[in-house]
Amino acid sequence: MELGTFGAILGFAMDLEERAAGFYEEVARAGLEGAFGELARGSGSRLRRLERARREMVAEMILESITGLDGDAYRVDLNPEADEAGLLRQAQALEETAARFYRDAAAKMPIQEVVRLFQRLARENEQRKAMFGQAC
Amino acid sequence: MGITALKNYIGSKWVASQSSEILDVHNPATGEVLAQVPLSTVEEVNKAVAAAKEAFLEWRETPPLVRARYMFRLKELMEKHFEDLACTCTREHGKILDEARGEVRRAIENVEVAAGIPSMMMGYNAEDIAVGIDEECVLQPVGVFCCVAPFNFPAMVPFWFMPYAVACGNTYIVKPSEVCPISQNQFFEILDEVDFPPGVVNLVNGAKGVVDALLTHADLAGVSFVGSTPVGKYIYSTAAANGKRAQCQAGAKNCLVVMPDAVLDRTVAALLTSAFGNSGQRCLSGALVLAVGEVYEPLKAQLVEEASRLKVGNGLDEIVQMGPVVSQKALDRILGYIEKGLEEGAELILDGRGVQVKDYPNGYFIGPTIFDKVRPEMVIAREEIFGPVLGIIPVADFEEALSIIKDIPYGNAVSLFTSSGKWAREFKYRVRCGNIGINIGIAAPIATFPFAGMKDSFFGDLHGQGRDAIQFFTDRKVVITRWF
């Protein structure tokens, strides 16, 4: 799915965070509360930041159309019922994909405030992925 | 779900109009009827003015700090209902959600700025203008004001005026566009929740009959208008003849000048959003590209290529980049201009007519349309089309571009795309136009700046938004004091 507008990109990002939060919550409930519970709460906070960005950072004068960003390239299949090693691998893939999405989207976005937000989110994803790397 | 019959809001009460004249409000993407709007009667206008006049007596004495708190409450509620407001705007107007969000954002910005009224409304004084004599100037509210709003920004435009008027201590009546009245209805639900004293803010639906009744009413102090030039002239002259203040933002024919040293990729992106954003139904829309020298051929090629890729559809779908135009009437008018352009000999290099949008056979859709080899004397180069139709005029140099801009009767917006500070400085210094973009395709002033306009694009002296709005909605009173 081509993400050619500010709203489409922010909507995709919010969907990504919602899926991440849902996945981490489910895993945390299944007995891996520690890090996964923290991540679920973190994704919730990131979702609110994105929602605020969509509401507050929209600038009519530079609502330029965006090309070359395909949402299908950032889909991750998630199965919260996998074993612990499988969950860690999925979490790593999720964080890696999210980081790649935010970096790619930041490069396309004409609104600098959103570029900065996406870069911050990508850095957080990279830190989270590194944390899973240590756990594996 | 039944069709909503819109009501008036007078004296903090929702009141059904007694008018027998009722119009359907359509969703331009689907053609479905969303609501019915009454063309209210003169008696209903009189009731709104009477409610506003009565409310003025106490409201003007309400301390500015307290009036500011109403603005804070209004802002909070607008934030809370942000997505709903944007969706309503898209449903009734057709613009894409991003554009609707931008519109609601600007409405909120104006409320935020108006919340600064305690300092913005301060006067000034001087001691010893003669020995032992002091002089002061205070700003006071004037009375009852109204806004006659356009269809193209149904959520935002009344907020260029109303928050400032009310924060200054005036009372207010909004007459929304009869084509897109639902957004203002929704805002008035919020204003009702803010709980302004009865009569401070009022809504009267209608068309010309309501406007005439307002403009000739003895108790109305002034009017703010946004719309076409003929109607702007009419409102300005009628208001003046009746001793009222008026600020009338009118039509436009905006030029986008591209110099050979422009950064082409960024320029094309800006031109596309300028010409085709809001489906070209902005008074800030770029209508003519003046391509200087050797930039003409590569610019034309890239414009056509990228414009042809814009996704047209229902604005509620986030991936859509351009929505329908507002009505069948608007679509017919735009198609008429395209025919006119062809008759005049312009070359149609991107034809948006007959665009098919899957699942929306009844929508008022037209795709991005580009004419090449437009000449300045053509009708399509002189009249406001108010649709997604862009004309390209190749020009030899910067001076020729300025000469074309000078001959256009409008002075709403112009933009220059260049890497040269020298050309940019020369451009902004010399063009007679209210809103100027340098490497910006939509020169839309934020709420702290006036929404400017010159020539046939504006009638009046003080504009909407910012300090101009405070001046428009206040009287200045000078007091000279000597104590014996």
Image (spheres, coloured by chain):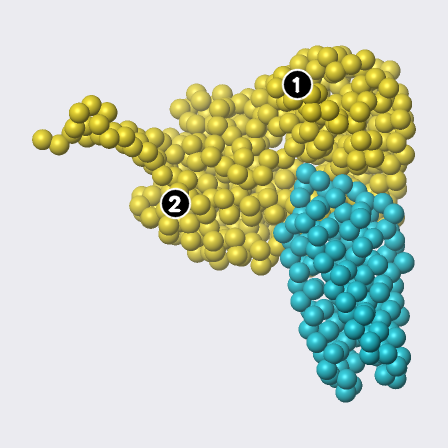
The reply, left or right, for residue B5 in relation to residue B200 is: right
**Residue hosting label 1:** B426
What separation in Å lies between label 1 and label 2 (alpha carbons)?
39 Å
Q: Chain of mark 1?
A: B
Q: Nearer the viewer, residue B351 or B297?
A: B297
Q: Nearer the viewer, residue B56 or B290?
A: B290
Q: Position of residue B106 (x, y in %)?
A: 59, 44
As shown in the figure, which amino acid type bears the numbered disc 2?
A: Pro
The reply, left or right, for residue B81 in relation to residue A39 is: left
Residue B149 sits in quarter: top right
Residue B408 sits in quarter: top right
Secondary structure at badge 2 equals helix
Q: Chain of mark 2?
A: B
Residue at point 36% right, 39% down? B122
Disc 2 crowd, CA 10 A, few/some/many (<14, 14-19, 20+) = some
User: Which chain can be seen in yellow?
Assistant: B
Specify the colour of chain A.
cyan
Residue at point 74% right, 72% down? A21
**Residue B13 to residue B240: above or below:** below
Q: Position of residue B13 (x, y in %)?
A: 45, 53
The reply, left or right, for residue A34 in relation to residue B159 is: right
**Residue hosting label 2:** B118
As shown in the figure, which amino acid type bears the numbered disc 1?
A: Glu
